[in-house]
Amino acid sequence: MLYIVGSQKEAEKLEGLLPKEVFQEVTRIAEILDDNYGADRDVFEEDGGYICILEKDSDVVELNTRHEVDLSEATPEICTKFLDGWLNALILCNNEFGINVILSTQTAISKRFYVDD
């Protein structure tokens, strides 16, 4: 399932739905966004950005269809493997807006962002 998170309050709703380490990474990023851009901002229109959690290929399609984020075209600023089977790719849209894409390595698109040595 595709999850979109823009604040700690939204991130807390995912507890128990994601692996513990993934949940911790999402809440860590959400805290940074809240601290720097405000917890009550419009995450799609105002500065800061949001976090997407993609577990399967259909989530990648949904992100492109519903939110017009095409991961086949996007170039991440940085991509790190933070847990066996999960990546965090930061896509900067402009100076003050980024999308953190937390994505399972089970998705086909993940190989575009990270090659395991």
Image (cartoon, rainbow, N blue to C red):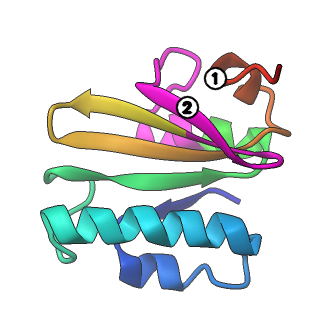
Give the residues drawn in magenta, as a range: 63-88
**Location of the N terminus (image quadrant):** bottom right
* Classed neighbour count for the residue bearing mark 1: other residues with Cα under 10 Å, few (<14), some (14–19), many (≥20): some
The foreground one among 25 and 68 is 25
Dot 2 amino acid type: Cys
The foreground one among 74 and 61 is 74
Q: Verify whether residue 69 appears in magenta.
A: yes
Image: 65 above or below 30? above
Q: Is residue 92 left or right of residue 66?
A: left
Residue at screen point 14% across, 50% down: 47
Q: Nearer the viewer, mark 2 or mark 1?
A: 2
Dot 1 amino acid type: Phe
Q: Is residue 102 left or right of residue 70?
A: right
Q: Which residue is mark 2?
A: 79
x and y percentages locating residue 115 in the rendered image: 76, 19
Which numbered tag is attached to residue 113?
1
x and y percentages locating residue 85 in the rendered image: 82, 46
Q: Are marks 2 and 1 in contact (CB under 8 Å)?
A: yes
**Location of the C terminus (image quadrant):** top right
Residue at screen point 15% across, 41% down: 96
Q: Is residue 59 left or right of residue 96?
A: right
Secondary element under disc 2, as helix, strand or loop, is strand
